[in-house]
């Protein structure tokens, strides 16, 4: 199960102390961490030079249709992405300083950055577009733009839900194209693959199994309905590129 694999992977990496991180890096053939890098990472940890901060979404606890167990597990998963993004940034910066950018270690860490960084950001957009009550404001700017792009708000909602209901795991994302200002629903299969260039994320729905199976089992449609009942439309509206379209 992809959820299980992803969760295990992130829980493992999240809980890594520096010694285990070095050990795992060795197993993976990432023998890039010289004694110098080791010291640098330790210093960075000690000095608290974490580039990205973990955001607190405890305000969502108690949200109708989402158990606290599910949400807390999801928060932990998200925190792993922030931690790993910072670890990768530190390690890549160190390799840059040491002139080791031509190494396989640098290339593999650089490839992984897209997965960890997007895993962090996608979850932040997701949690931040939850916690609202009530539907979209009819007559508001977003309502108007969705109507223009899809013919009606209902047509957009149907397409977004259908996108999120597709077989497979990933994300349903409503993007606004920066160049044209137009809106399009995208399916993102992996965090780091398939995002439209210049796409501003307006609404994000996590449809990895960890996002719903604890509460809904295989009934993804019920989770999607619960998601819609809790969209924070005020937050979503703030993401609009009003000067476009
Ligand atoms: Fe998730």
Image (cartoon, rainbow, N blue to C red):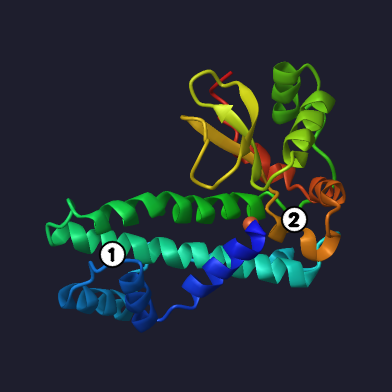
The answer to whether 91 is drawn above or below residue 200 in the figure is below
Marks 2 and 1, the one that precedes in the sequence:
1
Crowd band around label 1 with a 10 angstrom C-alpha radius: few (<14), some (14–19), many (20+):
many
Mark 1 sits near ligand 1, with its Cβ under 8 Å away: no
Question: Which residue is tagged 1?
Answer: 91
Quadrant in which residue 41 is drawn = bottom left
Q: Is residue 164 left or right of residue 9?
A: right
Tell me residue 79's x, y (percent). Answer: 54, 67
The answer to whether 37 is drawn above or below residue 126 in the figure is below
Q: Is residue 191 left or right of residue 85?
A: right
Q: Report helix, strand or loop for mark 2.
A: loop
The answer to whether 141 is drawn above or below residue 95 in the figure is above
Which is nearer the eye, 62 or 235? Answer: 62
Image quadrant where one finds the N terminus: bottom right
Which of the labelled discs sits on residue 131, or is there none?
2
Please tell me which residue is depicted at 35% across the width and 62% down the height of the picture. Answer: 88
**CB within 8 Å, label 2 to label 1:** no
Q: Is residue 245 left or right of residue 16?
A: right
């Amino acid at each position: 199960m992809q959820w299980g694999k992803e969760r295990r992977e992130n829980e493992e990496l999240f809980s890594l102390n520096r010694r285990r991180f070095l050990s795992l890096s060795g197993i993976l053939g990432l023998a890039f961490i010289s004694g110098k890098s080791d010291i640098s990472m330790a210093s960075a940890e000690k000095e608290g030079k974490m580039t990205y901060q973990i955001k607190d979404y405890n305000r969502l606890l108690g949200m109708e249709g989402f158990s606290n167990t599910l949400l807390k597990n999801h928060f932990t998963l998200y925190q792993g992405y922030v931690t790993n993004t910072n670890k990768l940034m530190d390690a890549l910066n160190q390799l840059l300083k040491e002139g080791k950018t031509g190494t396989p270690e640098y290339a593999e860490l650089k490839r992984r950055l897209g997965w960890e960084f997007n895993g962090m950001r996608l979850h932040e957009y997701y949690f931040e577009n939850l916690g609202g009550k009530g539907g979209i404001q009819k007559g508001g700017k977003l309502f108007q733009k969705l109507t223009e792009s899809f013919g009606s708000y209902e047509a957009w909602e149907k397409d977004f839900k259908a996108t999120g209901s597709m077989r497979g795991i990933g994300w349903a994302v409503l993007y606004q194209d920066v160049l044209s200002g137009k809106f399009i629903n995208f399916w993102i299969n992996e965090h780091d693959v398939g995002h439209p260039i210049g796409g501003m994320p307006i609404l994000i729905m996590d449809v990895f199994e960890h996002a719903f199976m604890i509460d809904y089992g295989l009934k993804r449609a019920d989770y999607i309905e619960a998601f819609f009942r809790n969209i924070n439309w005020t937050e979503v509206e703030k993401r609009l590129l009003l000067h476009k379209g």
